[in-house]
Amino acid sequence: MNENRDVLLTIRDLRIEGRSDEQWNEIVKGVDLTLHKGEVLGLIGESGAGKSTIGLAAMGFARDGCRISGGTIDFDGIDLRKASEAKRRNLRGKRIAYVAQSAAASFNPAHRLIDQYAEGPVQHGVMSRGEANRDATELYRRMQLPNPDEIGFRYPHQVSGGQLQRAMTAMAMSCRPDLIIFDEPTTALDVTTQIEVLSAIRDIVEQFDTAAIYITHDLAVVAQMADKIKVLLKGEEVEEADTRTMLNAPTQDYTKSLWAVRSHTRPEQPPVAPGTTPVVAVRNVTAGYGTLDVLKNISFDIHARRTVAVVGESGSGKSTTARVITGLLPPREGEVLFNGTALPPDYRNRSKEQLRQAQMIYQMADTALNPKQRLRELIGRPAQMYLGLRGKALNERVRELLRLIELEPDDFIDRLPSELSGGQKQRIGIARALAAEPQFIICDEVTSALDQLVAEGILKLLDKLQDEFDLAYMFITHDLATVKSIADEVVVMKEGIVVEQGPKSEMFQPPHDPYTELLLSSVPEMDPDWLDKLLEERAAGGAGASVEGAGN
Amino acid sequence: MSHILKMIAQRLALGLVTLFVVSLIIALGTELLPGDFAQERLGQSATPETVAALRAQLGLDQPFHIRYLTWLRDIVTSGDFGVSLANGNPVTEQISERLRYTLWLAFYAAAISVPLSLTLGILAALFRNSFFDRFANASALTSISFPEFFVAYILIFLLAGAGGVFPSMVNFRTDPTFSEYLYRAFLPAITLTLVVTAHMMRMTRAAIINLLASPYIEMARLKGIKPMRVVLRHALPNALAPIINVIALNLAYLITGVVVVEVVFVYPGLGQLMVDSVRVRDMPVVQGVALIFAAAYVLLNLTADVLATLSNPRLVHKR
């Protein structure tokens, strides 16, 4: 439908090099791209595919440590590679704008939102300060921000993540650019907030007929936003097609594997025999920081060989629950039972044996592994401390653990964390938890930072280990797709209260609690019409329209 | 704002405790030095009798804790810091004139060095790894690598000496007017500037460069903001806290650490007074000067913390 529109951006044979280990390596290897006026192109791929790098190159920009080494970038007749820096600078913000992944990090903490909004138009000489202020209020209103007259006078830390992301989109619109680069604008948001940001972005892009490059790793999201989709893998194009064609009939194997990614499902487990003592029982726990109660009277059980998924948006108290169970945060009221016996509230009063039985795996494997220790020490330490293994026995145990997590011991045992990929690091986190031979493991968002294919592998591994060692898992996540694939039971939390709990099969069948309904209906689906349908349904009062998301 | 006022009150109270501890340490420290004022004053000609008589006259025959507590009581009850053992003048009177000169010199040096180092630091960050950056860094490092007295004598050689423009000795026998003062104290001020500029400049540069990789700086660049404005408006406000702290430390140094420069230029400041008083074991004066030095550190650090807090909207504007 865009064939007869004017071409806005033409990229031919784009090559970008990144510097690592004192040499330049090609990270984008000859990508072509054509964008017409008013058209939205979705760029998808896993991390390292070069999506953001290409997005920035469309602004004639390369991050420190990167350089554009070949090809042409033509924006509306201007060769961005040959243009002077001053000329490129004059385009940036004014005709090509950028919306970053984390608005919280990309807004300057020292200035108010409206000052940052006005800076672009005023510096580019598009508007006076007064005009820019009025315009900001107008765009905040169009982005459906609450209190549009007042919100601009707040500092970034005073505004929630979803609102900041909308304020950043408004800021990108401030000079009415011809092209906006959206770099994973909703990845850091909760699902309920994501819906609002997606619909606001789509409306405003349509209203001003702005062309956009929408970068994401979430296929369902890009299906809602883009007219056409380009799939990237390791700096090369896999295929490009119109959105519907791409979703219905991908031609390349890689694309098909991406589409099929949410296929792993744990077989349904038989119900736990009545009267079985749960491994972990949380009983009427109320806990919080300072005077604020973060958890209010929550109770649930976790049985051996079962995975309980604790679901909720940021601030719902999921991680605080984990802190109470591990004894990092003694509760104000209630208790935690382990195999029927109450645990001391404070971990300092727990015995070594009690500590050994409950282990944790963290979201950011990067920061949870000591960068100066080799895998031998990282994995060996808990085995040495809890089980008293030494010398040869310890070495053998570490090798066995490495085999369990499907890493070749000879190859890996003396590596440092920096010599591992993200997925491998997370596997080391798992091995370290297993080394203590626990009965119970808390997995805190363990797949959130990983690409889908890699995350899938981790989930399968966790499943396999559970069967092998009769483990009980508490799986903290905000991602309902993950819940579907690995949970036996689900606990839905909102603002420190358990809203709903029960077996997975019940949770994903109506009738739902209204909040569960809101969460479930907010998970994007591959259908390109999903967002439209959902918004229509919500306008008519369905699909959880009556409850507020926690992010707002 | 109330939490800032509360912080100031708390810190001032803690400051008083600090001053008390400092006075105790100084008293103990001078007690450990061999000899006392009576012996030093009477020198070679001392006989045991005359020393004992002088001690009794000045109250030095009392045990240490009695002397210290008497001194402390006089301050707490009547604000009386005692009299100098050497000349019988009240300590406050003796210190106040020297303090005035010391503060003058500190302000003079700060007025040159703070703007200079901020400007150089910002420019070095802006043109990092350029020739300018390297040159500024190298010359700043060179100037702090030499001992102060060496810098001072080099300056005297170049700017005073034969055919020189500025006086090599600061003469305050007649009370100077403002412009006379600026002229007479020019060389010590420049010496001090050379000593403190490097530290502040390098911190400014490092604090800014540290932020240049932040997402909001990239955002500013992608908005098409000019590099100078990116540094001044987007990086600098977020780099203020560490810069302010380094400035405060250097200002404290300008008040308390300049004795060598005072000696070289015969400048009548507190440093010289301190050294002279320690030499003759003139305890009340030593204590008074030490308290002033400690108070300068306490107040400057407090000011730095308050300013650093005020420079951070997250601490000023609560959610």
Image (cartoon, rainbow, N blue to C red):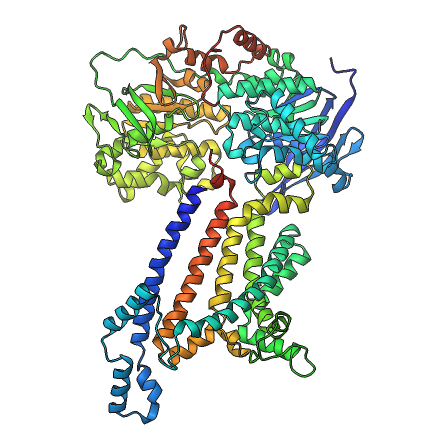
Q: Locate residue A151, reporting x and y percent.
A: 56, 28
Q: Quadrant of the N terminus of chain A?
A: top right
Q: Locate residue A486, reporting x and y percent.
A: 39, 18
Give the residue furthest to the right: A77
Q: Is residue A312 left or right of residue B25?
A: right
Give the residue furthest to the front: B78
Q: Residue at x 31, y 81 (%)?
A: B36
Q: Residue at x 43, y 42 (%)?
A: B2
Camera sees residue A21: no
Q: Is residue A333 left or right of residue B316?
A: left
Looking at the image, which is closer to me, A147 or B88? Answer: B88
Q: Quadrant of residue A509?
A: top left
Q: Quadrant of residue A175?
A: top right
Looking at the image, which is closer to me, A276 or B203? Answer: B203
Q: Is residue B207 left or right of residue B38?
A: right
Report the label total: 0
Looking at the image, which is closer to me, B283 or A230? Answer: B283
Q: Is residue A462 left or right of residue B120?
A: left
Camera sees residue B274: yes
Q: Locate residue A474, reporting x and y percent.
A: 34, 24
Q: Locate residue B74, reporting x and y percent.
A: 30, 68
Looking at the image, which is closer to me, B73 or B183? Answer: B73
